[in-house]
Amino acid sequence: MRKKLLSALLALVMLVTAFSGLSLTADATQIVTDPTGYTNASQVVYKTTGSYIANWGARGEACKFLSNKAQQYYTGSYTYETLSALSGGTGQSNAPSSALYSALKSMMNAKSTSTTSYNGTKELYKYTDCLKNDTTKISSFYSGALFDSDWDPSVWNREHTWPNSKGLNGNDENDIMMLRPTIISENSSRGNTAYGESSGYFDPGESVRGDCARIVLYVYTRWGNTGNMWGTSGVMENMNVLLRWMEEDPVDTWEMGRNDAVQSITGVRNAFVDYPEYAWLLFGQSVPSGYCTPSNSGSTVSYQVTATSNNPDYGTVSVNGYVITASPAAGYYAKGYEITSGSATVSQNGNVFTVSPASDCEITILFAKKEMVTVSFTVPDGVTMASQVGYAGEFITLGAPTGTPTDTTHKYTFAGWASDAVADTVTRPTLLTAGSRYTLQADTTLYAVYSYSEEGSVSGTGDYVKLTAAPSDWSGEYLIGYAGTSTIMDGSLAKLDAANNTQTVTVTNNTVAAAAGDPYRFTVRAVSGGYSIQSASGVYMGMGTADNGIAESNTEAYVNTLEFTDGYAEIIGSAGAHLRFNNSSSQMRFRYYKSTSFANQQPICLYRKDGGSAVTHYLTLESATPRPCDHAWGEGVVTTQPTCTQAGVKTYTCSKCNETKT
């Protein structure tokens, strides 16, 4: 049965019922919310907090498009065209031994960037299970009742949609994709009963039957829990019930939005939400005719979409339902499209074109030649850095120069690349650090910027000594430690907010040797309103919202407050979040925790570099070697006309130095 939109009054009645202690019949009504009204991916508005994405969808609103995040996820050997061509089983008994099962499992494992902890999910549901980007409320999985997103164990808890007692024994039991927030009474009424329709099974209700089936399939493939899948001793009654629930309760925008949110946390998506067709293919069944899926709306009127390339030598195209995938040849890109027959609305996201047809239609994908772009580097004498070349619109990864400046006035350290020469300054300029991405737009020159400590201000051994009182000025170089241990925060990381963002050092008499600590140090500088904190990798950190996480930037200096309280150092973000250490075995990380919960985490200590209050200077070192010309190529002139068998040549001449290129 298709999901229907009911009135806001009905949703309010459900909410009052859930909190009044009355018993809810699981299948009493459809769960509905105000629809987003989104009909294609380009309309979706994303709300982000740090790296986390909030659920932008609405419950009960059929999803007839793949989100931008979904379109970008399935590339290479993971496209629907590639995976759907693999063979599944011939039924529920041998599906796990099929090529499709193996490929889906491998894909989800390969895409994983982190796992969630049981305690950690409490702070993440505000993103994954909210409605329409409102992170102050969470929608209870089974009933849709709303409750405050702040953890309140007297109101809500976490439901293992795949019961803990049925084969979960590791990261799978704490996977936020499967672990859902529910009103306490809803959780207890289900217990660990298998989903199904017959006597002895738990029917979650029409509005979430499909949701449950898609979650169960996710765990079945992602974690390989195949021996606990079917029957009363398993999680789902049988294959027929699962597929019927999938069909009767198609994917809604809330599920698609939740997939985006979970991906931002763990890197993994539920493939059965984006492409529910996989459920039938996995068991060797035919996908129902007219079935509504995000990649093909399955409307009662089915239109034929065909696609062609404006030049097969420039690139080819493939069509899957209402989604066109462009495959440019080397040196070309998908510039746009043209509707050559029929009527449709088309949205482009890179090489993926999503079509909303109003009739049979033909779309021509317009491929164009990429422009070659050169990035030159200005470096001081004694240092080398080769130019990098690529196509406009693409990115390169910036490296670090090799060699040591011949200027020995100071001891210089490479700090990063700047778009202009930098005069000697104590204010850190906007820099691109080694390892960062640089999007190519036009021929350009980047300048190597070096730093040095002000002469005469450095004294002592240079080792890191544990602070036991607040200094009058916190400026200096530090190691951030987990109090009472030899664990420190790893300042060498390009991304600081990561599980296991730690290093182990030797602490002797409250001191860490400079050689051991320097690679992982953090530099504290006075800024307006407090202090900035910058890692050895060049990343500024802070937390400007009352949330858990780390805000990171290569250019923005966040404001922090530093204090010494009850024998411990405190680093506090501008919105009151405290930097603490999570010693959970599945987390083991330093990060900021909001003011209402930071006391649940472990305190930190700071080791200050002896003499580390030196002022840091930044500058572009002058070179005796002439700097490369910042070329101005102009329009160019055709110097060899093309023929039917041979390409032509266009020659460009720099108006500044008369250098030419073709």
Image: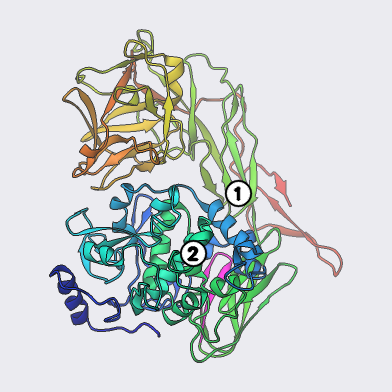
As shown in the figure, which amino acid type bears the numbered disc 2? Met
As rendered, which of 146 and 471 lies closer to the eye?
146
Q: What is the CA distance from the residue labelled 2 to the residue labelled 1?
A: 65 Å
Q: Which residue is mark 2?
A: 229
Asked whether the residues under the numbered discs 2 and 1 touch, taking CB atoms below 8 Å apart as contact, a structural biologist would say: no
In the image, residue 317 above or below residue 165: below
In the image, residue 372 above or below residue 583: below
Q: Quarter of the image containing the N terminus?
A: bottom left
As rendered, which of 659 and 493 lies closer to the eye?
493
Residues shaded magenta: 346-357
Residue 232 location, x and y as percent?
43, 68
Q: Which residue is mark 1?
A: 632
Tag 2: Cα neighbours inside 10 Å, few (<14), some, or many (≥20)?
Answer: many
As rendered, which of 433 and 591 lies closer to the eye?
591
Please say whether residue 236 is visible from this viewpoint: yes
Q: Residue at x 60, y 49 (%)?
A: 632
**What secondary structure is found at the residue carrying circle 2?**
loop
In the image, residue 131 above or below residue 593: below
